[in-house]
Amino acid sequence: MNAKNENNVMLSISGLTKKFDGKIVLNEVSMSIEKGRTTVIIGPSGCGKTVLIKHFNVLLRPTKGEVFFKGRRIDDLPESELGEVRTHFGFLFQSGALFDSMSVYENIIFPIRQHHHIKDWKAMDTLVKNKLSMVGLDGYQDYYPASLSGGQKKRVALARAIALNPEIIFYDEPTTGLDPIRSDVINELILKLQRELSVTSVVVTHDMKSAYKIADRIVMLHNGKIIADGNADYIKNHSSPIVQQFIQGQVSEKDLERLRSTTASNDPNLLTNPVDQ
Ligand SMILES: Nc1ncnc2c1ncn2[C@@H]1O[C@H](COP(=O)(O)OP(=O)(O)O)[C@@H](O)[C@H]1O
Ligand SMILES: [Mg+2]
C-alpha cells in the first residue's frame, strides 16, 4: 500500500526513526493521518508522542524516514518553505502558552501577523469574534491571560490555533492540568471543531476518557513502535498486556512483585505510575 498517494490521507510518515544523542526514540514508525478524522496518540510518558507530532509539522527533522503532507514530501524542505506549509496546521501545545503581555485579541491575531500584513482591521475584529465564539469566549477580546482560568487559556489558545483556518489541528495533551469538567469542555470543543470546520485532528493524550470520547482511531506508542492501532473498541479489547496495563492505568505484575519484596524507601521506581501524571 502506498498511503501517501491515497486521496483521503492528509499526512503520512514513512520509516521514521528519531534518535537523540544516539538514543532511539522512534524506531521505523510509519503511519497515515486520514482527512476529517480524529486520530488520538497514546502511550506512557516519555515514549515519543510529542516527538512524533513534532515531525508531522517538521518542528523536528527525522534521523531517517520521510514526512508527507498531501503527498508532498515536507521533511526536507528549507525553513523558508515550511512557513507556508505550517499555515495549514494549527497547534495547541502542551505548554499552550499565551503571550502574557498581549490581550486575548492580540494573541489570536499573532499567527496571522506572522504571515500577513494586516490592512483590514475590521475584518480582523470579525475574525477574532468568530474564533472566540467557536470556543465560547466572545467578549473576552480585551482580557489579558493573567485574568483567565486554566480552561479559558486553553480555549483562547485553541481560538489562536484556528486563526488561519487550518486543515489539521494538533493537540498535545489538551486536557492535562484541567479538572474533569473543564477537560470535558475541551473534549466537546475538539468534537465541535471537527464537526463544524471539518478539520483533521491529531490529539496526543494520556487521558483515556478523553481518548474514547473523541477518537475515531487510537494509536498506541511503546518503545519507539506503534503497538496498537484501531478504534476505541479495538483498543479496549486489545490482547496485549502492555496495552491493557496502560489503558487501565494498572500497576503491572512485575511492579506488584517488586512491591511485595521491597519497601518503598529503598526503591524509588516502585510507585511509578505507568500513565503520565
Ligand atoms: N530535543 C530533545 N533532545 C533530546 N531528547 C529529547 C528531545 N525531545 C525529546 N527528547 C526525548 O525523547 C523522548 C520522548 O519524548 P516526548 O516525545 O516528549 O515524550 P512524550 O511521549 O511524553 O510526549 C524522551 O526520552 C525525551 O527526553
Ligand atoms: Mg509529550
Image: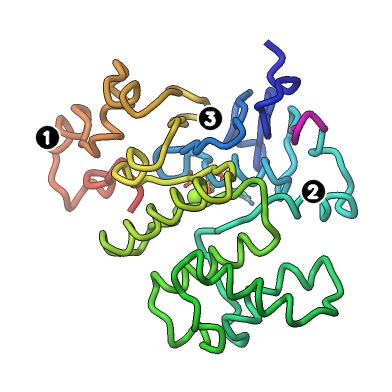
Residue drawn at point x = 53 percent, y = 35 percent = 37
To which residue does mark 2 refer? 85
- The label nearer to you, 2 versus 3, is 2
At 59% across and 50% down in the image, what residue appears?
169
Residue drawn at x 54%, y 67% is: 157
Residue at the spot of label 3:
224
CA distance separating discs 2 and 3: 27 Å
Q: Which residue is mark 1?
A: 261
Quadrant position of the N terminus in the picture: top right
Using the image as rendered, state which of residue 44 and residue 75 is in the foreground: 75
The residue stretch that appears in magenta:
68-72
Alpha carbon separation for disc pair 1 and 3 = 30 Å
Q: CA distance from mark 2 to mark 1?
A: 54 Å
Callouts 2 and 3 close, C-beta under 8 Å: no
| In magenta stretch: residue 69 | yes
**Disc on the earlier residue, 2 or 3:** 2
Q: Position of residue 67 (x, y in %)?
A: 74, 33
